[in-house]
Every structure is written in C-alpha cells, then in structure tokens.
Image: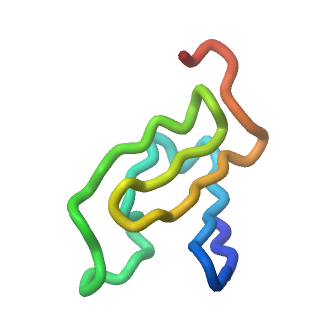
Amino acid sequence: MNQQTDKKAREIEVTAEDLPLHCPTPEMLLWNSHPRVFLPIEATGEALCPYCGTHYILKGGAIAGHH
C-alpha cells in the first residue's frame, strides 16, 4: 500500500494483492480505528470509507469481470 499525505482527506493506493479491501487497514493505528468495513473497489477502481472518509484507489483501475 502506498499512502499519500493530504490535508483534506487521506488517499491510499492499493493493489490486487490488498483485496479484499477493508478499512481500517492493518497499517492503521489501533487507537484511532473504527469498525472494519469491507469496501467494493473492484468494479469502479475506487472506494470511499463511510466511517473515516479515506479514499482508496485501485492501482491499474477496475478489474474486468467484476460488477
């Protein structure tokens, strides 16, 4: 995972190896975590966590065959 710093919201690039995607990720600190939620990123190539607003982008875009 490649984390990029942004003042407005966190944006994290993930790869196919990170799937199935869930937030918080194992790299996030436990003290500021929220309930784990699985995010469907395969169809569109991006997902937004409903709890913390982290924006995830799938490197290479959407995966063919997912809907």
Q: Position of residue 26 (x, y in %)?
A: 38, 68
The extreme right residue here reads 60
Q: Quadrant of the C terminus?
A: top right
Q: Quadrant of residue 28?
A: bottom left
Q: Is residue 35 above or below residue 61?
A: below
Q: Position of residue 53 (x, y in %)?
A: 46, 63
Q: Is residue 32 above or below residue 59?
A: below
Residue shown at 69% from the left, 18% from the top: 64
Q: Is residue 67 left or right of residue 52?
A: right
Q: Is residue 8 left or right of residue 49?
A: right
The extreme top residue here reads 65
Q: Quadrant of the N terminus?
A: bottom right
Residue shown at 64% from the left, 73% from the top: 3
Q: Position of residue 49 (x, y in %)?
A: 43, 55
Residue shown at 78% from the left, 41% from the top: 60
The extreme front residue here reads 8
Residue shown at 33% from the left, 61% from the top: 51
Q: Is residue 44 left or right of residue 60?
A: left
Q: Quadrant of residue 43?
A: top right
